[in-house]
Image (spheres, rainbow, N blue to C red):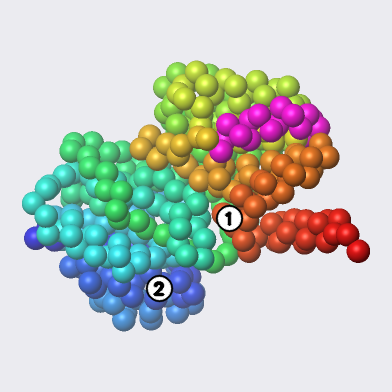
Amino acid sequence: MKKLSLCLIVKNEENSLDDCLKNSKKYADEIIIVDTGSTDKTKEIAKKYTNKIFDFKWCDDFSKARNYSFSKATNEYIMWLDGDDIILENDVNEIIKWKNNSENCDVLMCKYVVSYDDQFNSIFEYYRERIVKKSPQLCWQDRVHEVIVPHGKIIRNENIKIFHNKKQTNSSERNLNIYRDMKLKGEYFSPRNQFYFARELYFNGYIAQAVQEFKKFLEDEKGWVENKIEAHLNLAKCYCLQKEYDMALSSLYASFVYDLPRGEILYEIGNVYVEMQDFNRAIYWFKLALSARPETEKGGFVNKDCITFLPALQLCYCYFKLGDNCYAFKYHKLSQKYRPKDAKVQHNENYFKNLYTKKQPN
């Protein structure tokens, strides 16, 4: 059986750490907790699961903190989690199954589910390097949006899922400020750093600057294809916020040179045409999005809503705007199949109930 060390870096996780660790002793042979400055009951909760709790003075460098946690691990393999991640019982069993099999690897890639419904059905997911063999070569890189660059024998396990259970949205500019500090100090920006810097600018509302930084990233031939596709998507969203719809469409179409069109791209093209009030063209692209397949094996971010619920909802709206209630109702029922409790779906349901009630003969 493989021996597994579980490593976490945490800060003020009292509301989530119990959920994260409650199943940990079933699969982890050792639990390492590195605290970066908690002022709540995080350490008290951690003590329920391990006595290997270490302090790390925060220095705006996630990789240093994670590498420090890895340095405390004593087993052949190391698994990492965030303090607000959770592992369901079925996934615990899959980890145990992996530990018991004879197949060795250097990196085990597992699905990271960062958005899901109330039945834990995945909406937004991507693969991450979740378990690695203890090795100096397999270490964390980058101060923010840290990563272990996989090498050696890499296996993807689609059966092990880690659910990110973030209970509140962090609206601070913490990550963006780290990138700004790197810029100020003249630190090297890899293409990956450049991509995430642009994305942080976009997420924090610095749209004009985000446009320039996304362009700079896309001009570098060394960037990862999946990041380039997402950069075109986010750049298009920036252009839409500036009401530059032709530029948005050009950015989205430009992503086609890298690979087959992603569902997220097809859906966003439809959204641009909705903004332009061109509902017939929007319908064309939303229908294409509905027929797309999720490209989970490519390693990029996959939002399954963009090929299921969201285009169905938008098709309902487009046909309504064109005065075709028959087709609007058809796609309303499809969106209802995906998300019956969604507020917009329930609003549409009431609309159609009232519409067809009024058409009933006296």
Nearer to me, 323 or 40: 323
Say which quadrant the N terminus sits in: bottom left
Q: Is residue 242 left or right of residue 171?
A: right
Which residue does the image show at 34% across and 72% down from the upper left?
21
Q: Which residue is mark 1?
A: 337
Which residue does the image show at 22% across and 40% down from the upper left?
154
Number of residues whose C-alpha sits closer than 10 Å to that of mark 1, classed few (under 14), some (14–19) or many (20 or more): some
Observer able to see residue 54: no
In the picture, residue 271 is in which quadrant? top right
Q: Which residue is mark 2?
A: 19
Number of residues whose C-alpha sits closer than 10 Å to that of mark 2, classed few (under 14), some (14–19) or many (20 or more): some
Q: Give the extent of the magenta segment.
A: 275-290
The dominant secondary structure in magenta is: helix
Which residue does the image show at 38% across and 81% down from the upper left?
44
Residue 356 vertical position relative to residue 305 in the rendered view, above or below: below
Observer able to see residue 199: yes
Give the number of the disc on residue 159: none
Say which quadrant the C terminus sits in: bottom right
Q: Are marks 1 and 2 in contact (CB under 8 Å)?
A: no
Taking the magenta stretch, the answer to whether it contains residue 278 is yes
User: Circle 2 — which element?
Assistant: helix
Q: Nearer the viewer, mark 1 or mark 2?
A: 1
Image coords of residue 57 (percent x, y): 40, 61
Which residue does the image show at 75% across and 39% down from the upper left?
318
User: Circle 1 — which element?
Assistant: helix
In the picture, residue 199 is in which quadrant? top right
Amino acid type assigned to the residue bearing label 1 in the image: Lys
Q: Identify the residue at the far front of this view.
A: 362
Gap between marks 1 and 2, in whole Å? Answer: 30 Å
Residue 168 vertical position relative to residue 147 in the rendered view, above or below: below
